Image (spheres, helix red, strand yellow):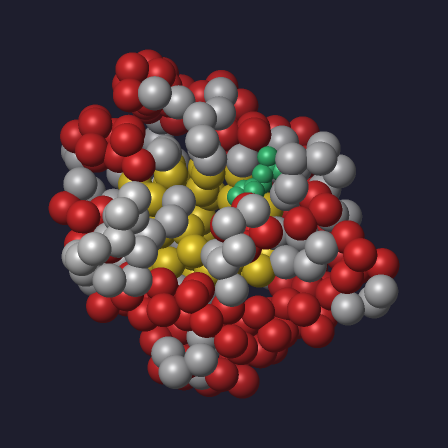
Amino acid sequence: MRLIAANWKMHKTVSETEDYIRRFLELLGDVPDREVLLCPPFTALHRAGELLRETPVRLGAQNCHYEKSGAFTGEVSPVMLREVGCSYVIVGHSERRHIFGENDELINRKLVACLEEGLRPILCVGEKLEEREAGMTFKVVETQLRLALSGIEEHTDRIDVAYEPVWAIGTGVPATPEDAVSVHRFIGEILRELNPSASGKTRVLYGGSVKPANAGEFMRHPEVNGLLVGGASLDPESFSEIVRSF
Ligand code: 13P
């Protein structure tokens, strides 16, 4: 089933989350053939988990630590996320990589921790503008994938991947569907090589300036197994429109 995910980033208080979810559930209606996921900030997860419990909408976190507990001031563990109702965690988002200095080794440890806790990670990969201009898109994406999945290749059926070109995030300039599809195909080839038996079980989502007006253009390609939406997911009207746009 295709996955349409909302990454709220550092937006929405608990009361704003309550208002959003009430409205979103009204607007969403019945969407049996696609999975819908909301990833609010940590402080809103518990309340969101309560409100989504009896609904088909899934809950995810935007980050986690790789240990279950310990002296890691300011961090949140997969065990804690599981308890408040999360079934997904976004791992290695470009903002984590580039603003907070996360490297591939750290991302790998986080993936291992999520899998141990039964959480489904969404591993984010994508090239920066200068890497794209230098013709390094495929190399960058391949390196990120291989390092992140190192040692857990046999579990790729329990992981999804999001291709988010860094230059397309929050800029209003998405990749063309054709460019995205060629990277999605390439990611699919690497995943097949890493784990032939998991073929087709890892969804490859596109993220970067997705809006109601362009979501359908990505989703009509079979290589695009879903979307990871930032800015346009903050409004329940526009996110429900994206979910229903194909
Ligand atoms: P925008 O949709 O705001 O470009 O953000 C994409 C993103 O980073 C989702 O994780």
Quadrant location, the N terminus:
bottom left
Query: Seen in the image, is 183 located left or right of residue 152?
Result: right
- Which corner quadrant of the image does residue 19 belong to? top left
In x, y percent, where is residue 123? 47, 60
Which residue appears at 48% of the width and 25% of the height?
Answer: 234
Left or right of 91, for residue 53? left
Q: Is residue 46 above or below residue 132?
A: above
Q: Is residue 241 left or right of residue 51?
A: right
Residue 150: x percent and y percent? 44, 80
Does 203 appear above or below 226?
below
Q: Tell which of 3 and 151 is nearer to you.
A: 151
Of the 4 image quadrants, the one containing the C terminus is top right
The residue positioned 41% from the left and 70% from the top of the image is 108
Q: Quadrant of ligand 1?
A: top right
Q: Is residue 126 above or below residue 227?
A: below
Evaluate whether residue 29 shows in this view: yes
Can residue 180 be seen at all in this image of the molecule?
Answer: no
Instruction: Tell me residue 41's x, y (percent).
Output: 36, 34
| Number of dots carrying numbers | 0
Query: Against 216, is 239 above or below?
Result: above
Q: Nearer the viewer, residue 110 or 228?
A: 110
Residue that appears at 17% across and 57% down: 69
Residue 131: horizontal and vertical position, in percent? 77, 61
Front-lying residue, 224 or 122: 122
- Relative horizontal placement of residue 170, taking residue 3 as reference (left or right): right
